[in-house]
Amino acid sequence: MEEKSKILNLEEAKIYWSLRAKEQGIKYVGHIGHSNEEHKNFYWRKAKFLNELIPRHKRVLDFGCGVGMFSHLFDKGKYLGVDIIDSAINLTLPHYRYQLIENYSEIEGRFDLIFTANVLQHISDLGDVFKCFRKVMRKGHLLLMENYTDSGVHMYPRGGVEYCNIIENYFHIKSLKTEIFEGGNLAMKIKVK
């Protein structure tokens, strides 16, 4: 069995995702070994599922937005997508706001909802990430995460209980809704204060 490679810092993550985007084509960076058609079908199933969970009229931070694959689910004027890969940011949807970041401390603003899709499983220590979330998250509003739980290269699979334990170090959880659906995906809608 091949040993897992670990991403140690943002610079290494940037290099990894830039190379993976170049290899797979920048329109998406997805699960290696799947066809474009499989990616499209899987995306639309996730988008439909997420659309039912997303509260409307909220200021949204899309953390690790990539090419902005899910940005259309949110109000244009209240959305900010951030990523570390400039080639992804360059291909995002028009009329949405995106920002290239070098580190978490560059994220500024106040948000009602933080959304992250398939990003957190690539980060070994989530402490700095949740410190950033705490800095920009308005109290009493929603945190929405959708995360893949299978293991693979550069992956730190976590289940719902483990995420809640981490989140409770930074927020008080008021309510929680979780769903597990195909492919080992875990979706969590968490109201925090």
Image (cartoon, grey):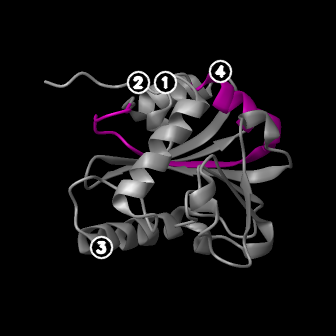
Indicate the position of residue 25 as horizontal and vertical percent values.
Answer: 39, 64
Discs 4, 2 touching: Cβ within 8 Å: no
Residue, disc 1: 124
- Of all residues, the one furthest to the right in this rendering is 109
State the mark number for residue 41: 3
Q: Dot 1: few (<14), some (14–19), or many (≥20) neighbours within 10 Å? A: some
Q: Residue at x 34, y 39 (%)?
A: 149
Discs 1, 3 touching: Cβ within 8 Å: no
SS label for mark 1: loop
Alpha-carbon span between mark 3 and mark 2: 29 Å
Query: Does the rendering let one see residue 187?
Result: no
- Of all residues, the one furthest to the bottom in this rendering is 94
Q: Which residues are magenta?
A: 126-155
Residue, disc 2: 6
Classify 152 as above or below 39: above
Q: Residue at x 35, y 59 (%)?
A: 24
- Of mark 4 and mark 1, the one earlier in the sequence is 1
Classify 43 as above or below 61: below
The mark closer to the camera, 3 or 2, is 2
